[in-house]
Image (tube, helix red, strand yellow):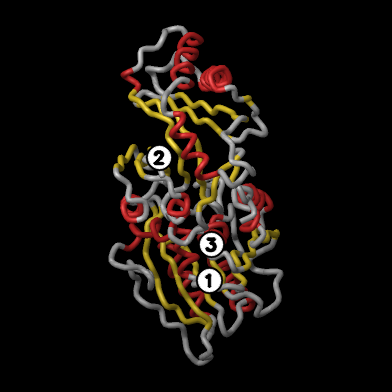
Amino acid sequence: MCDQEFLLTTATGSADLHKLVVKELDEQLQASYVERCGQARFFFRCSCDPQCFKSLCAPEKVYVVVFRMSTNTLSLESDGFAAETQLANLIASHDGWPSALSAWQTFVCNIDGDGKKPRRFRVTGKRAGQSTSQLSSNGISEAVGEAMMDKHGWVVDLHSFEVDVIVHFNDDMLVVMLPVLERASMLHSTFECPGLEQSVAWAMAKSAEVKPGEVVLDPMCGSGIILLEAAQSWREACYLGFDVDASQLERSATNMRLLSHSIRAKISLAQADVTRIPLPSQSVDAVICDLPFGKQWGSEEENELLYPLAVSEFARVLRPESGRVVLLTNQSNSERLVQALQAQKGMWEVTCRRRLTLGNMEAVMFLARLSGDEAKVAQIPRESMRLPWEDSRGRAKWQSLRAMVRLPMQPVFCGRKVDRKT
């Protein structure tokens, strides 16, 4: 067991997520030192117990820190090439390598047979700021690669490397680190093609109460954020995404590539119109949909016709015994959605209307279930600031709750998580 410095990164988020980081480091790792750096980085010291690390919910990635130092303690040459060589020699000869490599081996020693020290490596340099402007990211990568070969006898291999030496250098700090753990379901904490805010998409999926084996539909999936957030957290369901716009489906497919193979396998995409969903009647358990507000897509006048047709299709494809919807619209369309639900007499029971802010716009999330009382007109509850599962902290807790239901982290080796299929 060793007392080693690590760095973990999180998705940028709420104070509640940061509290979860500190709590996990204290209770699960018994960290002797924790330092928050910026919005999403935490340096800490603790012993190396991979099983305890894997049970952490908050981090996206964990690195072993070889060393770090304040930029203002360095005096580099003004010439870029000379400064890169000087920096590379400092990095390659630093006395933090034996401890860092020992920790690295603890996490990956069972992956490559005999657990030997790494021999094939690459260097990923990233430079930012004004005080280091004579250097370049590529120059740092090349210089450190040469210095490591000379000092340690390793071989640079950009494609079949065992370890990625990460060098971050900016106006504040030089950090040299080795990746050891990464969140299993995603390659990145954010999607390439933006769409609905991820925490809102996750909250919609949670409100649908998705159960194993169920079929979940987003009939206007756009860039697919709702489906991809849902599939990462409720992994035993089947997810279907439709959109009438082929370019939107391409965005969804691009985002899907950031998920692990096993999560992608749960999601199917196809081109279809929300008013003519190509599914049999009573074949879906839940519909989760960010309806068009008439701002970026369509118009409020078009929604007068679209909303009733869409709601009617939702009722058709949903199973009577389990069918429910989670629908999002903005405040100015809220009454249109109310009217669409009430127009289908006896079909819907609205259980919640939750107000929330999206950017500069007021929005409303509707939760509703199919009703078996054909003589009953849907009663619409008053707008609330809480969903049924929220506590007094409300939206501030969404990101920490989201973090707690994801797949565990996996060791990183050869630049990828060890088992990409899990």
Q: Which amino acid type is shown beneath numbered disc 1?
A: Val
List x then y, in percent, for residue 109. 56, 43
**Does residue 168 appear to the left or right of 38 in the view shown?**
right
Q: Mark 2 points at which residue?
A: 6
List x then y, in percent, for residue 247. 66, 49
Q: Mark 2 near mark 3, Cβ–Cβ under 8 Å?
A: no
Element assignment for label 3: helix
Q: Which amino acid type is shown beneath numbered disc 2?
A: Phe
Instruction: Report the disc number at residue 408.
Output: none
Marks 2/1: CA–CA distance: 36 Å
Name the residue: 62% across, 71% down.
215
Q: Mark 1 near mark 3, Cβ–Cβ under 8 Å?
A: yes
Name the residue: 39% across, 19% down.
130
- Number of the front mark, 2 or 3: 2
Q: Mark 2 near mark 1, Cβ–Cβ under 8 Å?
A: no
Instruction: Report the disc number at residue 210.
Output: 1
Please state which of residues 380 and 287 is positioned toward the viewer in this rendering.
Answer: 287
Q: Which amino acid type is shown beneath numbered disc 3?
A: Ala
Say above or below: 384 vs 374: above
List x then y, in percent, for residue 36. 32, 41
Q: Considering only order in the chain, which callout, 3 or 1, is on the residue closer to the N terminus?
A: 1
**Does residue 43 appear to the left or right of 407 in the view shown?**
left
Q: Considering only order in the chain, which callout, 1 or 2, is on the residue closer to the N terminus?
A: 2
Name the residue: 66% across, 77% down.
283
Q: Mark 3 points at which residue?
A: 230
**Does residue 401 appear to the left or right of 137 in the view shown?**
left
> Quadrant of the image for the N terminus?
top left
Element assignment for label 2: strand
Res. 395 image quadrant? bottom left
How crowded pointer 2 is (Cα within 10 Å; few <14, some 14-19, many 20+) is rated as: many
Please state which of residues 30 and 315 is positioned toward the viewer in this rendering.
Answer: 30
